[in-house]
Image (cartoon, rainbow, N blue to C red):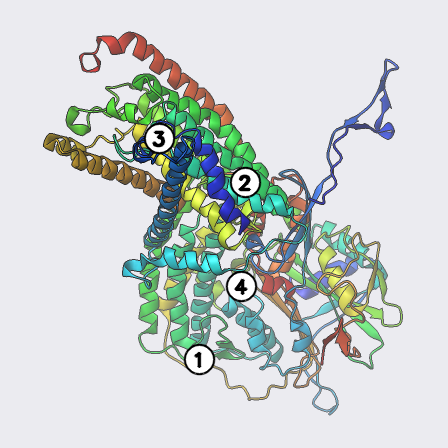
Amino acid sequence: MFSLAFAPLDAVRTAAAQVQGSQINDFLGEVKPDFVPGWAVPLTAAAIAVGIAMAIVSLIAMIGTWLERKVSGHIQCRYGPMRVGWHGWLQPLVDGIKLLLKEDMIPKGADRVLFVLAPAIVLASVMAAMVAFPLGPGFYFADINLGIFFILAMTSTTTIGVVMAGWSSNSKWSLYGAMREAAQVVAYEIPLGISLLVPIMVAGTFNLIEASNGQGGGLGIFNWYIWPWVNPFMLPAFLLFFVAILAETKRAPFDLPEAESELVAGFLTEYSGIRWSFFFMEEYAAMFLYCVVGSFFFFGGFESPLTSIARTTDVNVLIQVAAATTIILKGFAGLFLMMWLRWTLPRVRIDQVMTMGYKYLTPLALACVFGAALFEAFLAPVLPWRS
Amino acid sequence: MDFRGIYDRLRAMKAPGMTGCDEPREKNPEDKKDKGRFGDPYVLVEPALLPAFLDAVRMDAHLAFEMCIDLTASDPSTDDENLWVIVQLLSLTHKHRLSIKCLLPKANPVMPTSVPVHRTCQWHERECAEMYGITFEGHPDPRNILLPDDWVGSPLRKDYEFPEEYHGISCK
Amino acid sequence: MTQTQEHSPTISQSEGRTLESGEREYMLDVRTTDLEVNMGPQHPATHGVMRILVRADGELTTGAQPHLGYLHRCAEKIGENVEWLQYLPYTDRYDYLAAMNNNLSYSLAVERLMGIEIPRRAMMIRTICAELNRIGSHLIAFGTYGLDIGAFTPFLYMFREREWMMALFEKICGARLTYSYIRIGGVFNDAPPGWLSEVERFCDTFDEKWQEYVDLLMVNHIFVKRTADIGVIPKEMAIDFGLTGPMLRGSGIDWDLRRDMPYELYDEIWKSGCFEIPLGTGERGTLGDCWDRVYVRVMEMRESIKIVRWCLANIEPGPVIADIPKTLKIPPGECYVGIENPRGELGHYVVSDGGKVATRVRVRAPSFVNLAVLEAIMPGTLLADAIAIIGSTDIVIGETDR
């Protein structure tokens, strides 16, 4: 259970540096009694932020697993879970309890420290990334200027955890999984980052909220960056981004690190119970996070007809709720798309993954950036709807 | 080609090691002890020359037995002093089959391997070796295939006694 | 990890050679120690309890050695200890995905020794059952192959059709997997009323679904990329290893026992021209690759439907089992009968000494023979390809180990 305690602590440490100037921090600063020292404020704020982040991560993982089972079930002409609650909506809760109660096993010959640490690192990094995820234009833990950068950096830290898990398990299948994960993530970080440069260039900011604000107006739809009239290189950039996040989150057809028919369960082979569930929570949270990032930079972020209507009322709470609903729905729409792909496509081979990443996606992403830059520099200023 | 034709051709080409053939016959109504012999005809081959025989019938254009379908053994009874090694050949070109039987003395069940001729014999011979205790000389990989490596005895021999226990597991 | 890895490059003296100019040339050996990985006995891709000892250099396999016997149930020994009729249920257990075909092979072997005539209606029902079971078996083969490649959904679609097929068998004989329905002398009982028309409905539905599978998996770009040019078995190698069934036809060799050495009614069916023998063509890659083998299976399903339709159109009322005694005494002799099982030629070599019990029952199991080719084609492929190759051989461990 060491890792259970460790994960939030690690996240607190990471988040503490980032929550300076967050809403919670400001609020705590105002209500702080005099006898509390000043340095306690950001720490407490960070702890609260991480607590909320952890709750969100678990919630997303629960909804994610339920959705996965339902989506796969309906794609495969069956129902999926139906017994626990209406259409099995309580199933993830029951599963969670089962996983908690399972025997905590560490295989013989495993590197115990690394084995225990690995799921904690994986979960901590995704929770830290969650800190930068704004739920509404005025409702966030930390309004980080380099928000997208922070999220990418934190989520790719999970790789270290996965490699640790694979190495420490003392199983050759785990080692294979870890090596594949490392190779794959390194290959796809590049096109992922480069393809994101296109909307970043258009938005002129790394900040998620500012990127969203840049897409306002036009009934909440027509100013999304994805549209070709904003920048024709945005759609190919999004496709590259989507393929790259599939690979980053180890989702089919790029689920090689797990590859259940080849590597038994890859780096997860020796994990069970709560530790195993950590990896799963990370997977769903990371998927959701990447989808949210995608919607912030390509699909209007908070902007939707719903938010536009809410804006007309001028009630701040309504606007925030509408924005939060919008972004969560967009995130889950992306999640659904990823699940749909998973249950449709076969798996590609490791050399094909590498070829695709290095030989096709990276040059294409670079070409996209180049084209988009030219467009931004010469054409965008003269387009009436871009001025 | 039917069996007669194949047999005539085998004799004409002087197939190495062939000693004769056995064909089914009705039972003799006068002899009460005779039960007859039914089923398939086969040719008898000297075990030591089986690989040469297989190679010869594969190369012969009229027979062209390219494929070895099966190689197995049989222990007719405890009284018999011979084991049978039975090979089923198939010709894809001429669409005919041939059964071959080799009589191998139980006292010294050693014969050369047929793997150089048909690689499919590799696993069949491993199975025969472990089940009947036949030694195939020159076999590239003479390990047990279905039985554990430390299994004692030849289970498909008629005089095989089941072991009382195996690694502490009761077998009876 | 306990694996020892030699990372330091070494110059091996033995591999040095003198060039024409008089200089010495050495091979710089920078290879690391190969990893030995046990694929199995519990591994999702071995389709049962089989172990393949894979030597791997990173993702590249440099050697593969199948280890069998985990499911050895002494079928041949049992055959020498039970009566002729009692052995029939054991035949269900070798290739449990195609139990009808196993029953048929054994029954034909014993019938050949007895020299009895089988009623025509029995042969019709036998053919229908065997071909339906071939479809079911190929559905599993194709579905699990998709699973090996990473596509989960087609597998469950195929189970849907197989479920119907099993329901049909349940109606005719009460069992869903181990039927023992085809008996020595005919079949156990006549088809219940309405059964034949339901088979017809199955055939109609299946044609439609078949197209779906082909669109969903067979021509899927990723699937083709994963299977084409992988695990190529050239014609000579296929014959050398005694491969039969779809493995042989996948290598482009036009051989099907149903046509070339017909048993039962297949001669008549073939002459009516209602079915064809699909062959591997190498249209997506090289002739004899994994894709071709799977393609042959997929095409065979549709041919089987045609055979079933022919039987349905020509079936007539009549007796379904020949008059045979309860305790069989088989006349002395020996014979070998091989039939076209979904996996290849399933042969029974039976020897009788005239008694109630067989002297020898030898099972020539297609999976056992087909599996041997792995040792030859797996080295040099990627680990993921190794899985694709194992899947394309379509083995049933119950049959390899017997």
* Residue type highlighted by circle 1: Val
Which residue is painted at 45% across and 37% down in the image? Answer: A12
Q: Are marks 2 and 1 in contact (CB under 8 Å)?
A: no
Q: Earlier in the sequence, mark 2 or mark 3?
A: 3
Q: Which residue is mark 4?
A: C262
Q: Mark 1 falls within which chain?
A: C
Q: Position of residue B17 (x, y in %)?
A: 83, 61
Q: Name the secondary structure under disc 1.
A: loop
Q: Mark 2 falls within which chain?
A: A
Disc 1 and disc 4 on one polypeptide chain? yes
1 or 4: mark nearer the eye? 1
Specify the label residue A142 is tagged with. Answer: 3
* Residue type highlighted by circle 2: Val
2 or 3: mark nearer the eye? 3
2 or 1: mark nearer the eye? 2
Residue extending farthest left:
A313
Q: Name the secondary structure under disc 3.
A: loop
2 or 4: mark nearer the eye? 2
Q: Are marks 3 and 4 in contact (CB under 8 Å)?
A: no
* Residue type highlighted by circle 4: Pro
Number of callouts: 4
Q: Which residue is mark 2?
A: A162
Q: Mark 3 falls within which chain?
A: A
Which residue is painted at 60% across and 76% down in the image? Answer: C110
